[in-house]
Amino acid sequence: MAIEFSERIRRIPTYPAAGGYGQETLGGANSVVRLASNEAPFPPLPEVRAAIDHAMGTLNRYPDPSNALLRTRLGERYGLPSSRIAIGNGSCDILLAAGEALLEPGAEIVYAWPSFSVYPHLAAASGARAITVPLDAEERHDLPAMLREITVATRLVIVCNPNNPTSTAITLREIAAFLDEVPPHVCVIVDEAYCEFNLLDDPDASIDLLAAHPNLALLRTFSKVHGLCGLRVGFALCGSEELPRALDQVRQPFFCNALAQAAAVEALAHQDTVIERVTRTVAERISVDERLQALGLTAAESQANFCWVHLGEDRDEAQIMQGLQERGVLVRAGAALGSDTPALRVTYGLPEENRRFLDALAEVL
Ligand SMILES: Cc1ncc(COP(=O)(O)O)c(C=O)c1O
């Protein structure tokens, strides 16, 4: 007899993870080019590796359950009391915990679609109702339309800026005007996983919004520009102490491992590296976009470390994915990410990796 699972297990969608993990990754012209998961192509800094090595010596002890040093350093970096900073086992962990802390049957969550594939999990896991709002004609969040969906039942609104998978961003002015209209009982998470790559506004400027909005949380991660996704560590900068406290209530005590905490503390001390990586990524963004145009393709206006390529109605997305894969290039198919027209989401890699993607795409087309 088969195991009988809970009703919520039947509701929760399976995360559409990128393929290619476990394949050969190292060296040589024929190695796999991984442009499917919006990872950083840059290896960990020597100083970060040294901090991890050092932390390995005490792995017989549990990690600090309060993540005190990391929260103190983040507080110094962002000018917030550490009591308003939540840490997570990746920022996904914070999203899922927020769903658990805020949602229940009868409650509603509002987010744009297509957006990050984890958001549908929150409603499914809690039994809350998901209200999805289509992106506008430029594939950006339609904040006025999202505002119209907020009701007395709304507990959580997520704004993904820049948006995954479309790479587009909205301005801080638009977000500020939106927040002014959101009722104070509604928690707003602005998911800023890619904010360092967004040139529309200073990535630090959104922090000022926290002073006026206790219901706001800015979700950030060490997985993208800091390049530590293999360790899993993210954080939320919050407008009040209430959310971090509730997030800790719904999670196991030692959710952020010792190596991740040590690496994140060290990574924070290298803001010059962040700037250098953003500069290199933006240079690739410009050159990949030019070559896509030369191939007769258009992409959404990217403010992220990836692009969203429109293949055109007549093209066969699955066939193009297959052709790229045969040439050792892994990207994401739009269909798996909520697109109803043929599209690819492609992370910007190192110049050589981008060249291999574009050459393979030219051949396949
Ligand atoms: C918009 C967005 N938010 C959050 C995350 C989660 O990142 P992590 O859990 O690695 O911090 C991702 C990862 O791809 C993302 O695209």
Image (tube, rainbow, N blue to C red):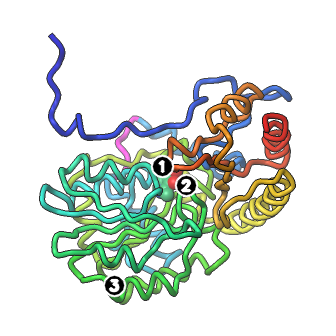
Say which quadrant the N terminus sits in: top left
Which residue does the numbered mark 2 point to in the structure image? Answer: 165
Separation (CA) of disc 2 from disc 3:
27 Å
Bounds of the magenta segment: 60-64
Q: Which one is in front in this view, the residue at disc 2 or the one at disc 3?
A: 2
Residue located 32% across and 46% down the image: 254
Given this view, does label 1 or label 3 mark the residue nearer the observer? Answer: 1
* Coordinates of residue 299 in the picture (x, y in percent): 70, 59
Q: Main secondary structure of the magenta part?
A: loop
Distance from disc 1 to disc 3, alpha carbons, whole Å, reads 31 Å
Q: Which quadrant of the figure has residue 106? A: bottom left
The x and y percentages for residue 308 are 64, 55
Which residue lies at the image location 84% right of the left edge and 35% below the top edge? 363
Marker count (numbered): 3
Q: Residues within 10 Å of mark 3 (few under 14, many from 20)?
A: some
- Marks 2 and 1 close (CB-CB < 8 Å): yes
Q: Which residue is mark 3?
A: 213
Could one spot residue 233 in this view of the protein? no
Which is closer to the viewer, label 2 or label 1? 1
Q: Residues within 10 Å of mark 1 (few under 14, many from 20)?
A: some
Q: Secondary structure at mark 3?
A: loop
Give left or right: position of 20 versus 85: right
The image shows residue 64 at horizontal and vertical percentages of 36, 52
Residue with the mark numbered 1: 338
Q: Is residue 6 left or right of residue 27?
A: left
Q: Earlier in the sequence, mark 2 or mark 1?
A: 2
Real-space Cα distance between discs 2 and 1? 9 Å
